[in-house]
Amino acid sequence: MSDRRPRLLVVDDEPTMRSVVERFAEARDFEVVAHAGGHALLAELRTLKPDAALLDKNMPEVGGLDILRTIREIDPECQVILMTGDATIESAIEAIKLGALDYLSKPLDFTRLDELLTTVRQGIERRQRFLAADTELAGRVEFCGMVGRGPAMQQLFDLIRRLAPHARTALVTGETGTGKELVARALHMLGPRRDRKFIAFNCSAVVDTLFESELFGHTRGAFTGAVEAKAGLFELADGGTLFLDEVGELPQPVQAKLLRVIEYGEVQRVGATEGRRVDVRIVAATNRRLLDEVAAGRFRQDLYYRLNVVEIALSPLRERREDIPYLTAVFIKEFARRFEKTVAGLSPGAERLLLNAPWPGNVRELRNVIERACMLSEGRVLSEREMLAALGGRPPERADTSAEPDEDEESGPELDRTTVEQALQQVGGNRAAAARLLGISRRALYRRLDEFGLR
């Protein structure tokens, strides 16, 4: 937890009142910023970043209610207390509606002010504990750069641990942004080749004419421009791991050569007459359905089965929303450090926006949104306004679920325990996917899990 004293902004056009309240709050270990108010204060609010504010309601130029509105826009977590010499029920109700913690009459009841400052301090300390706990827990559920506490990710982590010492080829499947390269790196780091090279190659970023040269190398004079011999990525990765990202983009002539490397452990440079032995673990990844590519004649069936000795399927972020708070905590910590910001968490409203977003770009998109929000941040907590701006300005709606049964639908097919168990096993324990497979809503699946004692 931070040792920084909470900052209290005291705004009153009467110097005597400012001085009295400043001494009173400093005696209770607040860092006090006293201000006479006016338009100058509105211009400074974004840099002052108070944890709490004590505002006089009636002041020249800008009244306390207008300052309250501005503070709530900048930092909804800032707790505000209003004070006035002409309190009315109507003005008190308006202040509370605008988000004020309380409304005090002048002359001030310092016993009541003491109670309110204690409440403010406790609220700040509680938020700090929650933010620290989120960050700590996010660190505990991190695995080789991936973060996940839900069952889908825990099963993924367990699968990687079991495969890493043994698998020589693996196929990682999943939508763009789900972290396929992180899986490949985890397999490398946890396996016997961890001390050798890990080389990543994006198959969608190379023109067709250069694939063979990049992967297998070439001899001097093998083609125009080959002024000297060059080792391919297979030779460079000898003894280590080669990650082929978007392997579905490989041209068919290259697919045939790749199949030979996997089967015989031998590469032949372009223009060479003899092959070279290599010992490389190959991890391929794709966001395509390779079986559909095989059926369409665009991907070799024999290569598919050689790559798919082990398939590691990654769930999209929308199917593991329980991990969003932990991912967010990790990204906030990363970007706060990079941008030298004080931001340590997000407001409840900002968290709701993240939990409801459709995330077609998955974890990569979430990371980009948090990066933008941290750039925009002016306080210790990412506000709903900042998060909305980072998301593009419109409140997100969940992805289209028209293909998914109604969440409130009670009816559904009769299912026995064995059928439900088999469905869960088939999708690796992913409950959302199991519900779709069974043709029932997730809520209906949870009822059956409870009924069969499988929860």
Image: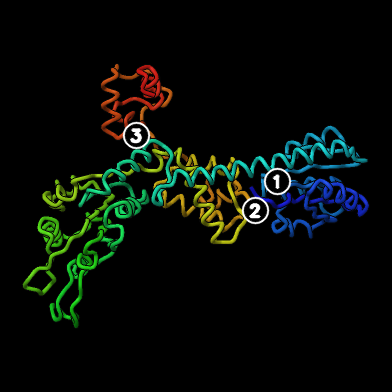
Residue 181 position, x and y percent, is 33, 54
Q: Residue at 9%, 68% (x, y): give it.
A: 275
> Could you tell me how far apart the alpha carbons at marks 1 and 2 are, in whole angstroms?
10 Å
Q: In the shown orientation, is residue 358 left or right of residue 66?
A: left
Residue 264 position, x and y percent, is 10, 58
Residue type pointed to by label 2: Gly
Secondary structure under badge 2?
A: loop
Residue 210 position, x and y percent, is 20, 70
Badge 1 is on which residue? 78
Residue 168 position, x and y percent, is 20, 52
Question: Label for residue 379?
Answer: 2
Q: CB of mark 1 within 8 Å of CB of mark 2?
A: yes
Q: Look at the image and tell me whether residue 364 can be seen.
A: yes
Q: Look at the image and tell me whether residue 199 can be seen.
A: no
Q: Nearer the viewer, residue 77 or 279?
A: 279
Q: In the shown orientation, is residue 151 left or right of residue 396?
A: left
Secondary structure under badge 1?
A: loop
> Could you tell me how far apart the alpha carbons at marks 3 and 1 are, in whole angstroms?
40 Å
Q: In the shown orientation, is residue 88 left or right of residue 65?
A: right
Residue 53's place in the image compared with 222, above or below, is above
Q: In the shown orientation, is residue 276 left or right of residue 280?
A: left
Question: Label for residue 430?
Answer: 3
